[in-house]
Amino acid sequence: MKPIIVANWKMNPATKKEALLLAGAIAKRKSKSIVVLCPPFVYLPFLLPYRKRMRLGAQNCSWQEKGALTGEISASQLKNLGCEYVILGHSERKKYLGETKEQIARKTREALAAGLKVVLCVEHARELALLQERVNLKGKKNLLVVFEPSFAISTQGGKRVPLKRIGKEIAAMKKLLGRGSSVLYGGSVDATSIQGILREGGADGVLVGAASLNPREFAELVKRADMA
Ligand code: PGA
């Protein structure tokens, strides 16, 4: 299976010009890995032309299909725009915006129903099990779960998680999700750590924050993923 590399730009960059430059630099390189760019919502329409080289994803969506929900964006609106993926349950949304398991479960249901591929972040296998009590995640082919402990995120301490621990947690998640499931790893992933995470950690791909904002670093990361 080709590694999946999801670039989470978070609330960056500051301007449309920079977003186009960054996407352009990333799109210049051919890769075997599947690269998914997840920019802020406002840049998505401008990055549609790059879809020949990479996929596009959003960083959130609503739990509701349509209607009175000021400031929200629905999964079907994203799908309709040409977006293929959506990141849900990111720890920053839980920590700073108070997103609950119930909301994440509803968003996941909604996004899968709209035909989006869901990149669902969890802290550990226990959290995945708790979400599974609220939404059926077994055997869902459009689901990619990310093992991303918040303490490993570069802006939250960036602690290195031993590859053995990554492997164990990923195996536990795969057991919960059933055969054919995809589990990625996230948290300070860069060009130096990618190969170990894919090989020894047994991850099917990675969720990358900071390193995805540096075109040179990201190109090297993708190159090493291609060789893993
Ligand atoms: P990081 O971010 O790679 O900068 O640690 C990852 C994430 O928060 O998804």
Image (spheres, rainbow, N blue to C red):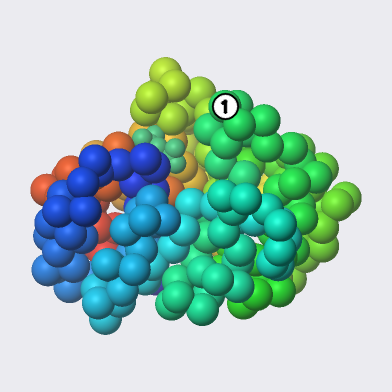
Q: Quadrant of the N terminus?
A: bottom left
The picture quadrant where one finds residue 39 is: bottom left
- Tell which of 125 and 134 is nearer to you: 134
Q: Is residue 115 visible?
A: yes
Q: Quadrant of ligand 1?
A: top left
Q: Residue at x 18, y 43 (%)?
A: 214
Q: Farthest right residue?
A: 133
Q: Nearer the viewer, residue 121 or 206?
A: 121
- Residue 3 visible? The answer is no
Say few, some or many: other residues with alpha carbon within 10 Å of mark 1 (under 14 / 14 to 19 / 20 or more): few
In the picture, measured across the screen, residue 188 lies left or right of residue 146, that is left
Q: Nearer the viewer, residue 19 or 87?
A: 19
Relative to 153, residue 83 above or below: below
Residue 15: image location, x then y, percent: 21, 46
Q: Residue at x 34, y 46 (%)?
A: 9
Q: Position of residue 173 (x, y in %)?
A: 68, 50
Where residue 106 sits in the image (x, y, percent)? 76, 55
Local secondary structure at mark 1: helix
Q: Vertically, is 80 above or below 189?
A: below
On whether ligand 1 comes within 8 Å of the CB at mark 1, the answer is: no
Which residue is denoted by mark 1 in the rendering? 96
Location of the C terminus by quadrant is bottom left
Which residue appears farthest toward the top when viewing the image? Answer: 157
Residue 149 lies, with reference to residue 213, above or below; the image says above
Rendering quarter of residue 145: bottom right
Q: Residue at x 25, y 77 (%)?
A: 49
In percent of width and height, residue 95 lies at 60, 27
Picture quarter containing residue 68?
A: bottom right
| Residue depicted at x 16% and y 50% | 18
Amino acid type, mark 1: Tyr
Q: In the displayed structure, does residue 133 sit left or right of residue 213?
A: right
